[in-house]
Amino acid sequence: MPWFGLGVFQVDDGDEVISSVKAAIEAGYKSIDTAAIYGNEEGVGQAIAESHVPREELFITTKLWNSEQGYEPTLAAFEESLKKLKLDYVDLYLIHWPLPAKGKYKETWKAFEKLYQDKRVRAIGVSNFKEHHLEDLIADCKVKPMVNQVEYHPRLNQSNLHEYCKINDIQLEAWSPLMQGGLLDNPVIEEIASKYGKSPAQVILRWDLQNEVVTIPKSTKAHRISENANVFDFELSREDIENINELNQDKRIGPDPDEFTKE
């Protein structure tokens, strides 16, 4: 699994997502993250097909939406995603939200295990799961989740969840790593960026990587897509990492996974 990729949340299907994915692949990205609810799997699939990069060199993630949880609905939803993406398999398939009020994520996970055992997916995981959701799932599963994709940025560093995932060999992955731009004018980050001759966004993304968190920033602008990926030629000091860690406020911009019930 690449450490760095492109997220396409709120990117319109058609020209916008096609051009974004193509720009990312041309800039050297190998990982693209979409979801059924984003409504742009077809555009992602078209961009992949037109990129002429060998399929095995790319890492494609999609996610199961809440309304399709349950064993048979999951299998049907996966086939629909695969059809839209025009792929023979996906590299990573995620349960988008635990939806504890519905109580179906264990049943859903059994379908995920079947897809994994049938080699329809290379890896299976979850998104927006807290520790207690993971504990509940792991208690009964045959295959442990390999990835947990969650909201993660300097205002929400989820240190306890991150430690739990490390102990259980679950790779943490960040969505909204730039807090939808909400941290780009933070004075602490601006000062660190000035020190390294980098942008605030590059500093935050580098912080993710040095904390061993896979990150998938979203952008639709080719120059920003290239700039975001230019984070492998410098390294933050331990002091800088700690200073960014101290920005944590346990502040979410997305919903609390215990309370989210949208289908």
Image: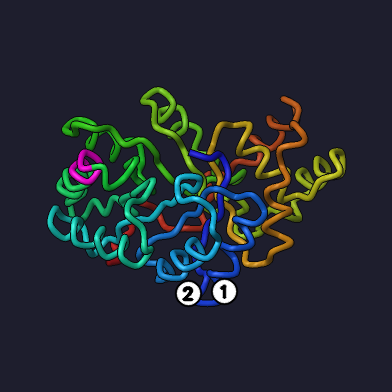
Asked where in the image residue 141 lies, by quadrant, the reply is: top left
Residue 10 location (% of width, % of height): 50, 69
Is there CB contact under 8 Å for labels 2 and 1? yes
Q: Is residue 39 visible?
A: yes
Mark 2 secondary-structure assignment? loop
Specify the segment rendered in magenta: 113-118
At x 62%, y 43%, the residue is 154
Residue 180 location (% of width, % of height): 60, 60
In the image: residue 108, left or right of residue 21: left
Residue in the foreground of this view, choosing between 198 and 100: 198
Majority secondary structure in the magenta region: helix
Is residue 117 on the magenta stretch?
yes
Q: Which residue is mark 2?
A: 13
Mark 1 secondary-structure assignment? helix
At x 62%, y 53%, the residue is 178
Q: Is residue 258 visible?
A: no
At x 65%, y 44%, the residue is 205
Residue 194 location (% of width, % of height): 86, 44
Q: Quadrant of the C terminus?
A: bottom left
At x 34%, y 49%, the residue is 94
Instruction: Indicate which disc residue 16 carries.
Output: 1
